[in-house]
Amino acid sequence: MVKRVSLWDAGCPVARVLDVIGDWWSLLIIRDAFDGVRRFSEFQAGLGIAKGMLAARLRDLTERGILEMAPASDGSAYREYVLTEKGRGLFLVIVALRQWGEDHLYRPDEPKSSLVDTETGIPVAHLELRAQDGRPLDWTETQVKKTTDQGPTRQRKHAAGTRTDRRRG
Amino acid sequence: MVKRVSLWDAGCPVARVLDVIGDWWSLLIIRDAFDGVRRFSEFQAGLGIAKGMLAARLRDLTERGILEMAPASDGSAYREYVLTEKGRGLFLVIVALRQWGEDHLYRPDEPKSSLVDTETGIPVAHLELRAQDGRPLDWTETQVKKTTDQGPTRQRKHAAGTRTDRRRG
DNA sequence: GCAAGTGGTCTTAACATAAAACTAGATTAA
DNA sequence: TTAATCTAGTTTTATGTTAAGACCACTTGC
């Protein structure tokens, strides 16, 4: 909604997500929230974001149920922004982004950070795509099944080949 | 790089990823590429993106090694854009976004699409965070370990509590 | 009570985007 | 082989978004 065009109604969950958190700052704010950042000034100083932008983003994320306002945990009269259950669900998105970044965006000698199991200090496992029965799946073994409210279910295989329809979900 | 500010050097993989694919269109182009879309006009018609934007995005994604140009698969003199190995690595990011969107952005009665196992037609399992030994992990059981090129490793726990430093990785 | 800190809003200039017009080479149809 | 059309862009222009900083009100600490 911060963008000119919206693909909310395209029926694709990915497009709809980008409509909500697809701008530059939202995911960084959420990332910081996962690290315990709660106060306006903390976000602002940590990200170097303009205050006007930050105010707009916090308002949007709150309206969309990803953050919620809470009284300050230190007893002062100020407010804090904390992740809702819905917002906490974005952790896997952050992890997926992080793991791809760690794997593809650093030179071998370059220092970076990793997400580790607090208990052991060992980096967490890479996310894996699996079938309901636990069988590992490759992206070529999946397809998007589009459920329309009327008419037959149309399907579309991943992995090119002969393409017959264009829009996917 | 399509944005004004860049957090490439912040040391955080998440910020670095957003620097690469953090704009509105890149992920939608990549999503379509996973569905077999290859030609300029296919992307353009499918997304409804302005041609100038599309040309710029395709150029950027190619320069960054996420897409590569290939001769047209139908034998014509035109070119096609296909995902590289690096680009295909983004599948889990798309899946993470999709699953969160499916879970949180649709009304119960609203039709949507799902990613299914082609073999069985059953939706794929939700992604899970696990330790190296396979133990399921909650986000509160993880922390970001920052490796700096000099000085001691600093750590930062997830889940608020007493925060002592601000910037995370 | 006063200075500093917190959490914003408003203004402005710089920049990105959307839409459409324009171009040039490739393909197809006559 | 010539013309019409398709493909894949580039350029232009109007408009929307962002960054940066000035400004303001309320809170807190001293």
Image (tube, coloured by chain):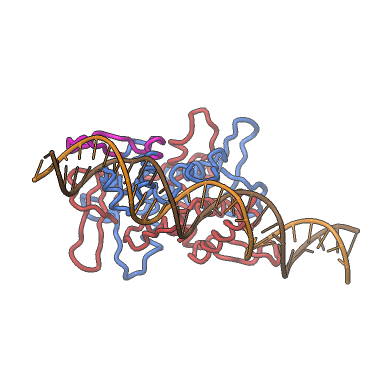
Chain colours: A blue, B red, C brown, D orange
B8 sits left or right of A131 in the view: left
Q: Position of residue A42 (x, y in %)?
A: 26, 48
Question: Which residue does the image show at 39% across and 63% down from the upper left?
Answer: A105
For the C terminus of chain B, the image quarter is bottom left
Residue furthest top in the image: B109
Q: Position of residue B147 (x, y in %)?
A: 25, 62
Front residue of C24/B134: it is C24
Q: Is residue B43 visible?
A: no
Front residue of A152/C11: it is C11
C26 sits left or right of B127 in the view: right
Q: Quadrant of residue D10?
A: bottom right
Front residue of A4/D14: it is D14
Q: Position of residue C4 (x, y in %)?
A: 18, 49
Span shown in magenta = A60-82
* Residue A77 on the magenta segment: yes
Q: Quadrant of residue B74?
A: bottom right
* Residue A73 on the magenta segment: yes
Question: Which residue does the image show at 62% across and 39% down from the upper left?
Answer: A154
Q: Position of residue D4 (x, y in %)?
A: 84, 58
